[in-house]
Image (cartoon, rainbow, N blue to C red):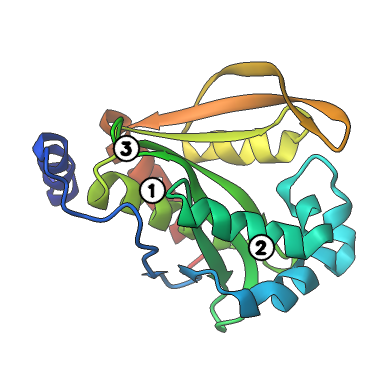
Amino acid sequence: MGRADDRIAARRNDTARPVSWRAVPTLAGCHVTLRPLVSDDKAALVAAASADGLWNLFYASVAQMKDAEAFMARAFADQEAGRALVFAVLDANGEVCGTTKFMRMNEAHRRLEIGGTFYATRVQRSGVNTEAKLLLLTHAFETLGCQCVQLRTDRLNRRSQAAIERLGATRDGVLRGHQIVDGRLRDSVVYSILDREWPGVRQNLTYLLARHA
C-alpha cells in the first residue's frame, strides 16, 4: 500500500478529523489553481460564461451566470451555511477561467458532491478539468477523509456524463423529476467514487493528465 493509501486508511480511522470542512483551501497544480471564490471574480466569470455563447447551454450550470448577482449570492450563502466550499478556477497564466465547488457537504457521513462546474471554452479539452478533478478528489479523500464523493449532471448533458465517466466514476442511476430548473423538469444522472476506489481513479487521472504535459 502506497503513501496515499496509508493516508486514506488513517483518515478513515480518525474519528476526530481535525481538518476543517469549513475552510476553502488553495489547491495548485501545473495547469490549474483552485482558490477561494471572491466577489471581485464576478466580472471574469461573466466573461468566461458569455464567451462563445457558452451560457446558452440551458442544461449546464454555466447558464446560471446569466444572473451573476444571484449566482454569487447563492454561492456565498451556501458556503456560510457550511453546505459548500466554492472555488475560482485559474488557468496556468493565473487568469480566472471558471468555477467549481464542493457541495451537499455532510461531515457526519463523510460525503460530499463536486459540482457547479464550468470552464471557459478556451480551456476546454485541455488539462484544466482533469487536474482540477484530481486536486479536488485528492483533497476530499486524502485530507477531509471522505468515504464517498458524488457527481451529478443533467440527463441532457451528454458531454458532462462522458467526462465524468472518463474520470472513472461509477454511474449510480437517474433521479427522475429531480429538480425544476427554469420551468423545466430536470432528470439528474448520479455518479459516485468511494474511498476504496480512489487509488484506481487517482491512477487513471494521473495517466490522463500526463497526456497534456
Determine whether the residue tagged by mark 2 lies in a helix, strand or loop.
helix
Please state which of residues 145 and 95 is positioned toward the viewer in this rendering.
Answer: 145
Q: How crowded is mark 2: few (under 14 residues within 10 Å), some or many (20 or more)?
A: some
**Labels 2 and 3: the sequence-earlier one:** 2
Name the residue beneath numbered marker 2: 72
Q: In this view, does 190 lie above or below 210?
A: above
Q: Which of marks 1 and 3 is in front?
A: 1
Relative vertical location of residue 61 with respect to residue 106 in this rendering, above or below: below
* Residue nearest the observer in this picture, 1 or 33: 33
Q: Which of marks 1 and 3 is nearer the N terminus?
A: 1
User: Where in the figure is residue 172, as x and y percent of width and height?
Assistant: 52, 19
Where is residue 34 drawn, in percent x and y? 47, 67
The residue that mark 1 highlights is 137
Q: Quadrant of the N terminus?
A: top left
In the picture, residue 73 is in which quadrant? bottom right
Residue type highlighted by circle 1: Leu
Which of the numbered marks, if any, corresponds to residue 95?
Answer: none
Contact, mark 1 vs mark 3 (Cβ under 8 Å): yes
Foreground label between 1 and 2: 2
Q: Which residue is pictured at 70% across the width and 73% down the height?
A: 42
Check disc 3 and report the residue beneath it: 198
